[in-house]
Image: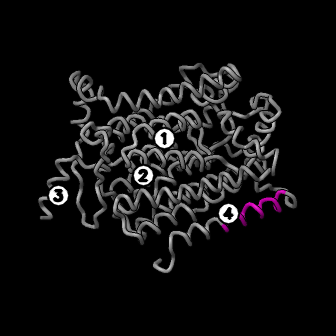
């Protein structure tokens, strides 16, 4: 590891991604199975419509912000691979942000490089960008928010948060933990918040238990004194204004079609096609009956309960909280595709230096059951889609096993994680200085 510098890793990763993009062009031209993601074709078509002065929503199945189509307009001007290069560059930017965040938290260089490699050389991540999926852009914005918070740049964090929620609505789950850590004693004007540094010793930062958090949240005094602080109001106001501005602008340009396809569709989405979600079979059997809005929204209840428990338990350790939230959100979602895994893979390197889990044996076990459950599902998916066999029940059982695998792995990771608050209160910083003297 010592022979590799961060610059060498980035250069090697860039060359590797360039080679994959070029290979993808060859495979698309010579093989029946295309390397390019079908979503990339949808993005490109929507960008061409926008370049011609038309609505990107004239392209069926385009259900994203117009910002994405705007970013890919060069696809129809310069080259169709522009977007792949943009997404792959965002992929590398995520690697840069991971190292920056870890270095700011005092993680040694060898651990930093190892963690960055988990992102840069993960088969899920390097294929997502080179196949033309936009998720690396979202991951880069999420990590930028975290970095801004660590630097005490509250306005910048709020701007990027409002933008990323408009761009891809799932980061809305991070709102509550962000608001909880915006302690007025930490975010003082003209001062950077003190960060809890990495330590190889098995020590835990003080964390309030779940019961005390619930008692605080349901106390009227807590609502008046703690929630309504300048920092929280400012963050909510700025991020809300950015979200509303983007939404209002595109509603003015593209009308109800934008509002439905880019935002409302994702809240009430029911996909009858097979996917990793445990809900898919029920939706497949009943999709012709047209679900009511209440039925569509009720599936969010398990997600909401799990999210609340995770946030109240781990909010102070913000990167870990976001990771656990994202894994749980994806596992319990109504629709799960492989690209969603990237949402938590970009956060995984940020928690590895604080994990007590060794690769041998618990690490190998976690990787094996998660990958095995996924391959088991893919086997039945292949028999259904390519061989035309009626294996819907088996596929649904495989989805249940995949949920069990996600739950098991997340539970193992939580038990093996050394909780460490991202920020330190000024008095605890002073106490540490006294002890060192």
Counting residues from the start of the chain, the first of labels 2 and 4 encountered is: 4
Q: Check disc 4: other Cα within 10 Å, few if <14, some if 14-19, many if 20+.
A: many
Location of the C terminus by quadrant is bottom left
Q: Residue at 15%, 64% (x, y): give it.
A: 436
Q: Residue at 38%, 34% (x, y): give it.
A: 176
In the depicted view, which residue is nearer to us: 265 or 87? 87
Judged from this view, the residue extending furthest toward the bottom is 3
Q: Quadrant of residue 392?
A: top right
Marks 3 and 2, Cα distance to the nearest angstrom? 32 Å
Q: Residue at 12%, 61% (x, y): give it.
A: 435
For residue 372: magenta?
no
Q: Which residue is mark 4?
A: 17
Label annotation for residue 329? 1
Marks 3 and 4, Cα distance to the nearest angstrom? 45 Å
Q: Check disc 2: other Cα within 10 Å, few if <14, some if 14-19, many if 20+.
A: some
* Magenta stretch: helix, strand or loop mostly: helix
User: Along the horizontal axis of the image, is 34 left or right of 197?
Assistant: right
Counting residues from the start of the chain, the first of labels 3 and 2 encountered is: 2
Label annotation for residue 120? none
CB contact under 8 Å: marks 3 and 4: no
CB contact under 8 Å: marks 3 and 1: no
**Mark in front: 1 vs 4:** 4
Determine the secondary structure under disc 1.
helix
Q: Which residue is mark 3?
A: 432
Q: Which residue is mark 2?
A: 410
């Amino acid at each position: 590891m010592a022979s590799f510098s961060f610059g060498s890793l980035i250069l090697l990763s860039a060359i590797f991604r360039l080679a994959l993009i070029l290979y993808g062009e060859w495979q698309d031209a010579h093989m029946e199975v295309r390397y390019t993601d079908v979503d990339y074709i949808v993005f490109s078509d929507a960008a061409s419509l926008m370049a011609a002065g038309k609505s990107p929503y004239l392209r069926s199945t385009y259900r994203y912000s117009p910002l994405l189509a705007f970013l890919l307009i060069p696809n129809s001007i310069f080259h169709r691979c522009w977007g792949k290069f943009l997404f792959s560059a965002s992929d590398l930017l995520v690697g840069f942000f991971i190292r920056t965040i870890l270095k700011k938290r005092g993680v040694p260089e060898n651990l930093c490089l190892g963690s960055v490699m988990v992102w840069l050389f993960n088969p899920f991540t390097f294929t997502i960008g080179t196949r033309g999926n936009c998720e690396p852009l979202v991951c880069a914005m999420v990590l930028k928010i975290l970095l801004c918070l660590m630097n005490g740049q509250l306005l910048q964090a709020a701007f990027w948060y409002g933008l990323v929620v408009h761009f891809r609505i799932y980061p809305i789950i991070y709102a509550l933990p962000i608001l909880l850590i915006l302690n007025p004693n930490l975010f003082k004007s003209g001062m950077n918040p003190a960060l809890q540094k990495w330590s190889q010793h098995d020590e835990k930062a003080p964390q309030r238990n779940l019961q005390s958090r619930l008692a605080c949240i349901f106390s009227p005094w807590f609502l008046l004194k703690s929630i309504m602080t300048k920092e929280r109001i400012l963050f909510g106001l700025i991020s809300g204004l950015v979200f509303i501005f983007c939404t209002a602008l595109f509603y003015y340009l593209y009308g109800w079609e934008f509002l439905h396809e880019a935002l409302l569709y994702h809240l009430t989405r029911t996909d009858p096609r097979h996917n990793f979600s445990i809900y898919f079979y029920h939706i497949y059997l009943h999709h012709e009956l047209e679900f009511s809005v209440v039925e569509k929204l009720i599936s969010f209840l398990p997600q909401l309960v799990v999210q609340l428990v995770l946030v109240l338990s781990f909010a102070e350790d913000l990167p870990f909280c976001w990771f656990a939230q994202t894994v749980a959100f994806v596992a319990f979602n109504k629709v799960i595709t492989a690209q969603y895994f990237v949402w938590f893979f970009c956060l995984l390197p940020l928690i590895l230096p604080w994990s007590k889990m060794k690769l041998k044996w618990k690490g190998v076990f976690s990787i094996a059951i998660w990958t095995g459950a996924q391959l088991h599902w893919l086997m039945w998916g292949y028999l259904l889609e390519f061989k035309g066999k009626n294996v819907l029940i088996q596929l649904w059982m495989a989805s249940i096993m995949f949920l069990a695998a996600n739950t098991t792995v997340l539970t193992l990771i939580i038990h093996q994680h050394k909780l460490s608050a991202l920020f330190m209160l000024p008095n605890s910083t002073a106490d540490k200085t006294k002890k060192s003297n």
